[in-house]
Image (spheres, rainbow, N blue to C red):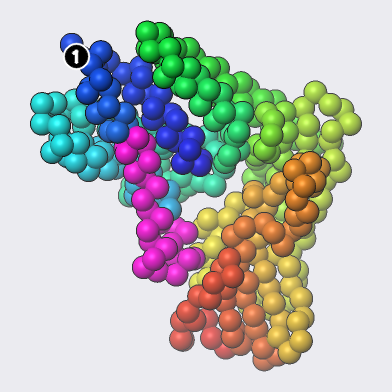
Amino acid sequence: MDNLTHSLTGVLAGRVLPGGRDEETAKTERTVFWLMLASVNLPDADIITNIFTDPLTALHFHRGFTHSFVMAPLVALLPALVVRLAARRYSFARLWSYAMIGVVLHIFIDLITPYGTQIFYPVSGARYSLDWMFIIDPWFAGTLALLLAAGKVAVRYRRGLGFVTLAFAVIYIGAESRMHARALDLFSDQLTGSGTSASSVAVLPQPLGITEWMGLAMTEEGPVRQYLRLFDEGGIVAPEYFPFPRDRYTRRAFGTSYVSRYLKFARFPAVTSSAEGELHAVEFRDLQFSVAPRITQMVGVEAGERDIPFLLRLEFDSSGSLVSVTFNGRHIPLVDGVDGKP
């Protein structure tokens, strides 16, 4: 989820949390505000790994250690300690418990989006996604911002408006959960009707509305994608099939450590293989980041399959030797003796 939404949920938590006997004082409100703002955004500090390692390796650190429910008590220590040094009149236990609420809130909000969150790291590196909400939801964030702003203006009713905002957030997320279940049933029926057998099935939210969904299924031949609009019989787009290429370059690519690492992250990888001059390129895209053309056209963007993020590209020479690997356009160092010429 984007950091604006994380920040808004942190401010909301600060509005409804009990502040103790001095909860009405401006100093207490400021302390809780900054503590919640810091703790609810701290898990995304893991993006710093992009500075110290290649982007494919950094991919596996994001939403890992700092996004784990197991590690949340440890992660919450930092903002609690910093605020304790600045505001010594507050008990550390209280600050730490508030900071942990902020960290856990961040993890939960990320969990309900696609991408995958390692919520049990280091016990398990498996990624989990509830797939209820798109990574950026302007309706959710915008309503939160308006309600929180109203509480800033109407100071007398701030705490009450905080609970109203909390009720909105719970109802909205609950509605998205229900729409997700409905979309999953619809997509499963579509697969059954077409006789498609899949090893994994998911429906993922699309931007701009909770009735817009994308169904994805992984078959032995490759992934299947279908865009769906709930409550609109004409809004079910014909399924698209992405069969895996069967050439020697694709087989060679699947045997590399780069693709092995990529597939630990990608849920529905689509593969293309093509000759480009003296080289042969094999590209991997994760279809979970697709957006329906109808939606991109609505916002004035012409996006195609090449615009899907998290693109892994491998280039081979005519002898089958791997000569170049890029991820999101950035070069990945080749490992001698591992992924060179077979």
Q: Quadrant of residue 28?
A: top left
The x and y percentages for residue 233 are 87, 28
Q: Is residue 336 magenta?
A: no
Q: Secondary structure at mark 1?
A: loop
The x and y percentages for residue 185 are 72, 29
Count the marks: how many?
Answer: 1
> Mark 1: which amino acid?
Asp
Q: Is residue 163 above or below residue 64?
A: above
Report whether 108 appears left or right of 254.
left
Report whether 25 appears left or right of 200.
left
The x and y percentages for residue 166 are 46, 17
Q: Which residue is mark 1?
A: 22
Residue lying at 20% horizontally and 29% vertically, measured from the top left: 95
Report whether 150 appears left or right of 70.
right
Report whether 118 appears left or right of 100.
right
Residue lying at 23% horizontally and 16% vertically, measured from the top left: 25
Assign the magenta stretch its main secondary structure.
Answer: helix
Residue lying at 27% horizontally and 27% vertically, measured from the top left: 30
Going by the picture, which residue comes out furthest to the right? Answer: 234
Residue 110 appears in view: no
Q: What residue span does the magenta drawing correspond to? A: 37-61
Residue lying at 54% horizontally and 86% vertically, measured from the top left: 340
Quadrant for the C terminus in the image:
bottom right
